[in-house]
Image (cartoon, rainbow, N blue to C red):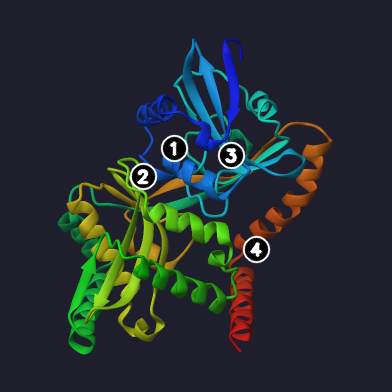
Amino acid sequence: MSGVRIRVLKPDELGEEQTEAWRELRAKSGSPANPFMEPEFTLAVGRVRPAARVAVLWEDGEPAGFFPYERGPLGHGRAIGLGVCDCQGAILRPGLTVAPRELLRACALSAWEFDNLEAGQGLFQPDAAEEFASPVIDVGAGYAAYEEVLRAQSPKFLRTTLAKERKLGRQAGDVRFVFDERDPAALRTLMEWKSAQYRRTGRRDRFAREWISNLVRLLHETRTPGCSGVLSVLYAADRPVAAHFGLRSPTVLSCWFPAYEPEFAKYSPGLILHLRMAESAAAAGIGMLDLGRGAAEYKDALKTGELRVYEGSSVRPGARAALYWLSREPSRRAHSFVRGRPRLAGYAQKTLNQIGRLRGN
C-alpha cells in the first residue's frame, strides 16, 4: 500500500472537495449509477447512525478512494446502512492498490460485513460467501419497448395487470399516478402500510427502528443529481392505494419500500404501480429500475435481466475476528441452508405467516 494514506472521518466532516471527488470517482467506475453509492446516502446515514465513518484514501495528495462503513463493538464493522442499503462497497480510483486487511486495520476493524456488495468490487468480492440475483427492469429504449418485452415474455401478466388497472378505475374512481410525490403525509401512509405488512408476514418491522424511519424521512427531502428520494403513489379517486419509496440517480431508480392498501389487493395495485413507475422513469431519462435482491413473483414477472450482489465478510485474523465469526457465521449459514431448499423455505414462510397472524390478534 505504498504511497496511499488513509484518514478516517465522520461523514459530516467530509468537505465539498472530497464529496465532489467521491462523485467523480464513482462516475468513472463504469458501474451503474446506483444512488446508494453516492455520498448523499452516507451523509444521511451519518445523521442517524453515530457510528458511521468514512475512510478517505489519499494518493499523490489527492482523494483516491472512499470507504463508508459503520463500526460496532470489538471493531465489528458493517456496510453503511446495513439492513436497508441495497448496494455496498468502496469507491476507488481505478488501479489503486490497497489490501483489504490493511484498509480494515486503518479503520480499526476486525471484520467488515456486507450483504449487498456490488459486482466488480475486487477489493472485497473474493471474501463473499454467497452470490444473489438483483432483478432489474431495463427501460433504456423507452417504456413502449419495455411493454413489448413483457408482451413476449409475460403476455398474461401484462394483459391481466392492465385489465385490473381499468377495473380499479371503474370500481374505485379515477386512477392517477404521481411519480415524485412530495407530501409527507403520503410517506407516512406508505410507512404505516409497510409496517403492517411486516407484522402480517411475521417479519421484523424495519420502521419500528427509529434510525430507519428517520433515514427514510431525510432521504425523502434529499434532492441532489446523484441521489434523490422518490415517493411514487397510485391514487384511485384521490385515495392512495399503493406507494413506493426509493432512491434515484440520473440513470438508475433503486426500488426500496413498496406497499399497498390491502383493501384493494384484488386489483394488484402494487403491480400497476410498478408499471407506472417504469413508464415515468423512462420518461425522466432513467434507464434502469433495480428491484433489489430477494426472490418474489412480481419481480420475476417485471424483470428484464439481473445484476449480481454478494454477501459475506472480510476479516483480519485475530481474536476479535474469531468472535465475529462465532457471532455471525452460524446464523448466516443456517439462513443460507434454508434458502437453498425450497421445501424448507416454504415451511419457514408458513411459520412466519402464523407468527404474523398471532401478532395481529
Residue 288, position as x, y percentages in the image: 30, 49
Q: Which residue is mark 1?
A: 39
At mark 1, the secondary structure is helix
Q: CA distance from mark 2 to mark 3?
A: 18 Å
Quadrant location of the N terminus in the rendered image: top right
Residue 153, position as x, y percentages in the image: 28, 62
Q: Counting residues from the N terminus, which is met first, the one under dot 3 or under dot 1? A: 1
Badge number at residue 338: 4
Q: Nearer the viewer, residue 209 or 177?
A: 209
Q: Counting residues from the N terminus, which is met first, the one under dot 1 or under dot 2? A: 1
Q: CA distance from mark 4 to mark 2?
A: 35 Å
Residue 104, position as x, y percentages in the image: 66, 30
Seen at 21% across and 58% down, the residue is 280
Q: Left or right: where does residue 178 sit relative to residue 23? A: left
Q: CA distance from mark 3 to mark 1?
A: 12 Å
Q: Counting residues from the N terminus, which is met first, the one under dot 1 or under dot 4? A: 1
Which of the 4 quarters of the picture holds residue 298?
A: bottom left
The answer to whether 101 is drawn above or below residue 234 in the figure is above
Q: Counting residues from the N terminus, which is met first, the one under dot 4 or under dot 3? A: 3
Q: Left or right: where does residue 246 sit relative to residue 96? A: left
Which class describes the residues within 10 Å of circle 2: few (<14), some (14-19), or many (20+)?
Answer: many
Badge number at residue 227: 2
Q: Left or right: where does residue 252 sit relative to residue 131? A: left
Specify the amino acid type for callout 3.
Tyr
Which class describes the residues within 10 Å of circle 4: few (<14), some (14-19), or many (20+)?
Answer: some
Residue occupying the far left of the picture: 144
